[in-house]
Amino acid sequence: MKKIYTLILAFLCFFAQSQPYSSLLKDANWTVTKIQYNGIDYYPPIPFTQSGKVAFGVNTVDGFQSTFYNNANGKVTFGANNATYFTLQNIVVTLGEYYGVNEQLVREFDAMTNYFYVGFQPTDPFNFQYEQVFSGKNLIVTNKNGNKIFYSTLILGNSEVAAGKITSIYPNPAKNEVFLKSSENIFGKVNVEIFDDSGKLVSHKKISHANSFDVRMLQNGVYTVKMTHSGIHYSFRLLIEK
């Protein structure tokens, strides 16, 4: 039985490699699983954990659309000789404003998702890594700034990663102490890392059976708070004003 599975997987890999990437990327239902911005991972926030999409060949043969709450639309051109990059032209972003659950996080992730593809020259390459696995496909796109956006057709896996318990931090702006807002009680340790606006790690602590952490040592400014709990990663922007 193991030999049969190996042969099937080998056939799928061979079949995938025999198709042009333009077809492979067009013939998939891609969902955003995370964005890596300046080396920090950001995950789709509730209630939009499976709303982030990218589509190649939408509406027209060379149509492109990146979707979260807003859309980035334009034209895609794939690299010659089946190269692992594409370029984008005439990108236009819609400007709807979201009001609702997790308002701040949704707006931030929406901006990161769509503006990932904006502000580049028509010839600037978006390099990608395509992976065919037995149960689906994975795609990693890297823009000229070195930021990455991760897509997958493995919806179940995406749901498990994105469905978190920590939904926000407050107050924001903060002075002395920051509290965690969660959909359920938090048990066990939460690893907290705080980065300044240049990406430098300025604080690292572990909190147990608590829902807050001290920020009195931080100077005024904008910070990124990265937390890990039960194998799930969270990222929040925090403003310190004293």
Image (cartoon, rainbow, N blue to C red):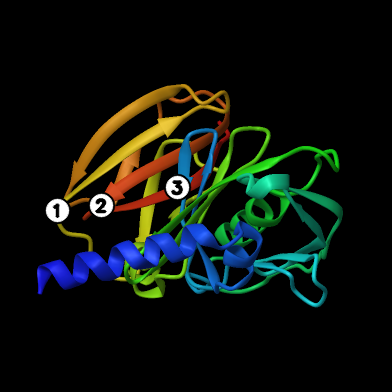
Q: Is residue 59 left or right of residue 53?
A: right
Q: Is residue 162 visible to the viewer in this orientation of the structure?
A: no
Q: Position of residue 92 (x, y in %)?
A: 86, 59
Residue sticking out furthest to the left = 1
The residue shown at (32%, 68%) is 134
Q: Nearer the viewer, residue 156 or 113?
A: 156
Q: Which residue is mark 1?
A: 188
Q: Quadrant of residue 25?
A: bottom right
Looking at the rendered structure, the secondary structure element under dot 1 is loop
Q: Is residue 24 visible to the viewer in this orientation of the structure?
A: yes
Q: Quadrant of residue 85?
A: top right
Instruction: Tell me the quadrant of the picture where the C terminus can be found.
Output: top right
Q: Position of residue 225 (x, y in %)?
A: 43, 40
Instruction: Tell me the quadrant of the picture where the N terminus can be found.
Output: bottom left
Q: Whole-Å distance between the Cαs marked 1 and 3?
A: 19 Å
The residue shown at (73%, 67%) is 70
